[in-house]
Image: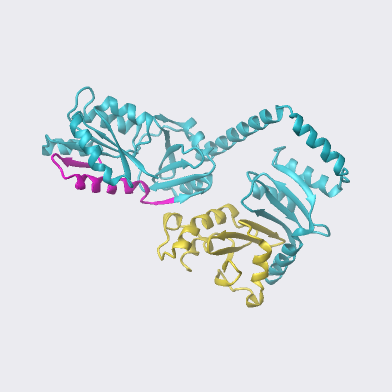
Chain colours: A cyan, B yellow
Amino acid sequence: MIKKVLFVDDDRILCRKILKKLERYKKRFTTLTAVDGLDAVDKLKENTISLVITDLQMPQWDGFALMAYLSEEYPDIPVIVQTAHSTPKAKQIALSRGAAGYIEKPYNIDDLGQKIIATLKKESEGGILQSVPLEMFIQLIEMEQKTCTIRVVEKKTDKHGVLFFKNGDLLDARISSLHGKSIAYEIFSWDEVTLSIQDECAVDKKRIDGDLQAILFEAIRLKDEATEKEELEANKKPATKAQKARATERDRAEPEPKALSLEENIKRTLESAMGGKKYLKDIYPDNSWSNFIVRASEIGKHFTAGSFKSCYIDKGQAIDFVILPGKEITVISVDPRCPRDRFLQALSG
Amino acid sequence: MKNLFRDILDIEDVHGVIFLSLDGKPVFNEFVSHPPKGLEHINWRLFIHSLDGVREAELVFENRRFFIKRAPSGYILVIMGETAPAEMVRLNCDILIPNLEKTSKKPKGLGRFFKLRQK
């Protein structure tokens, strides 16, 4: 993922020069420019910025005002201050107000480039994780009482969010310039995410009250509600002529299967365990899994595991399978979003 | 390789880990206590073949569970008791796979980030 750097300076000629010279780093980051603090604020709302480099003396909003704004609204974005009017006092003030770095004009563009790269690396100093279940990871942070900043990117939509933790406590969540609990709910609802871990947290103020577990549960509940609504909307659509014709043909071609009591039992057990959620797609006998059942049972014997009860299979397809060994092998096809452990527990019972 | 699987082995009620190549050849195994007898007699090739390219599987037996995760270079098989937190095992396998492929000595991400306590 190519990161974005925002260069803020009222000297437009300098901005154009910087844009051109920093192009050599285009494989690492791209550069945007803003002519003052207010312009920078607009650019921050429109883009996912990873680093701000700002001049101090600018009209309208100067560098200090911009830094104050960033520390409040975008505390995770590091700021490098650049100025031609450098005094030790100015440097001290800039660093005390949270600047991540300080560079005096005129500077060598390669020095600036290296400083940018080094600062950007900190975003993922704790590691990058792909396709990790976010709720589980968050619970681990709470358990281990970690202090960190987690940048979350949802793979499908490329949405970016940030979570701030201090000693395992969720202080805040941010998407663009929005903060708070509702933002945390949104981030926690994302499915396939990439996480970048930074081993520090720039936030001190707690903007999110409440227990993390309660927040996670609420996020999951809201997500389930939204999914149900979508499904209801989808089901409301009347069948097309083609769909009706196909259904009639199917009925004619295949005689209605006898209702098996085992299937009904399984269906009732699962619907009761899942609280009526429609994760269940189909239940049917299928002995094509017999070779797998035999091999798995042999493995189980070597480990004195007892009788083989069930198996959850994820083939990376649109549906997952639960296989129940027996005289006749029963296959349950399920939505991959189903709560797997609860499913298997219900079947074992 | 032992270090790569350390985080999984440290999870409560995980009994052992086996890593098999894509064609079922045992590459590595490590157990928390004694390995089961006759491990060398298991025909892993036939078992892997029966998986038919499954990405992930969880086998539930009377008193054991097996979690199987396919990596680009093989299959991770985690042997667990009934009380092992399966979600934690899955998560650690997800984290482990990139390191497995890099054959890096120093684990990154969760392995360095968290120390999972053994009761």
Q: Is residue A111 magenta?
A: yes
Q: Residue at x 46, y 66 (%)?
A: B3
The residue lying toward the viewer, choosing from B12 and A63, is A63
Q: Is A214 left or right of A14, judged from the image as shown?
A: right
Q: Residue at x 40, y 47 (%)?
A: A197
Quarter where residue A229 is shown: top right
How far from the left and from the top, in percent, is residue A325?
77, 58
The residue lying toward the viewer, choosing from A60 and A46, is A46
Q: Residue at x 66, y 62 (%)?
A: B51
How far from the left and from the top, in percent, is residue B45?
64, 70
Q: Can you say whether B53 is above or below A102 in the image? A: below
Q: Is A178 left or right of A17, judged from the image as shown?
A: right
Q: Can you say whether A183 is above or below A343 in the image? A: above
Quarter where residue A240 is shown: top right
Q: Can you say whether B35 is above or below A151 in the image? A: below
The residue lying toward the viewer, choosing from A255 and A330, is A255
Q: Give the residues in magenta.
A: A99-128
Q: Is A257 left or right of B100, judged from the image as shown?
A: right
Quarter occupied by the N terminus of chain A: top left
How far from the left and from the top, in percent, is residue A7?
26, 35
